[in-house]
Amino acid sequence: MISNISSNSEQNIDQNNLPILSFLNNQRKRSIQYVRFRMQTVKVYKNFACYQVEVNEQGNIWIMEIRYSTLQQFYEKLKEYLDIKLTFPGKLLFGNLRPDNLKKRAIGIQQFLQELGSNYQLINSQVCSEFLAKQRHYGTHVIDLTESEEFELDA
């Protein structure tokens, strides 16, 4: 009977050291980011335009108001640090504020952001995390779907 107890405890020890458990524990420690982007509007000022983009970070929704040049710098930084193949709209020499050019550029930016959001490696990179944190600081908070509040209804 004593030999049965010792073999069961050895079996438990072996189950705790299984490679799959080690893998799952490591996955639990990782911070996995899920982000979706949606172009809202284009605001045209006297000399420049800003793109308003809805950002949904795992239920935390906020509006990012950003200029093309800032997104272009971010894109260049992504290319520098990570070997990426994303589509980004080209720079215009003339007519930057013409409505048809703004619309084409907004569509290109939307495509870039969708590709970024669907690329697990990029959206979880240090470069992207720092960019989103900085933009979130300047962004407008809309709603946090991750927070819940419970209350009782009067009967």
Image (cartoon, rainbow, N blue to C red):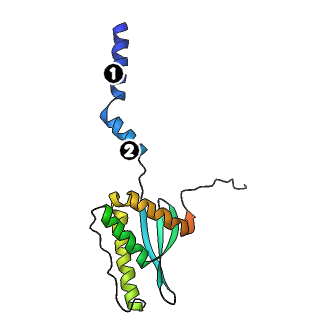
The secondary structure type at the circle numbered 1 is: helix
Measured as percent of width and height from the top left, residue 15 is found at 34, 27
Q: Which residue is drawn at the image coordinates 38% and 90% (left, top)? A: 100
Q: Amino acid at mark 1?
A: Gln
Res. 21 image quadrant: top left
Q: Which residue does the numbered mark 2 point to in the structure image?
A: 27
**Quadrant housing the N terminus:** top left
Q: Place residue 148 in its image quadrant.
A: bottom right
Mark 2 touches mark 1? (CB < 8 Å): no
Q: Nearer the viewer, residue 83 or 38?
A: 83
Q: Pick the quarter of the image with the C terminus.
A: bottom right
- The residue where tag 1 is placed is 11
Q: Amino acid at mark 2?
A: Gln
The answer to whether 11 is drawn above or below residue 44 in the figure is: above
Work out which residue is located at the far top of the displayed protein and give it: 1
Q: Residue at x 38, y 13 (%)?
A: 5
At which x and y percent is residue 150? Answer: 64, 53
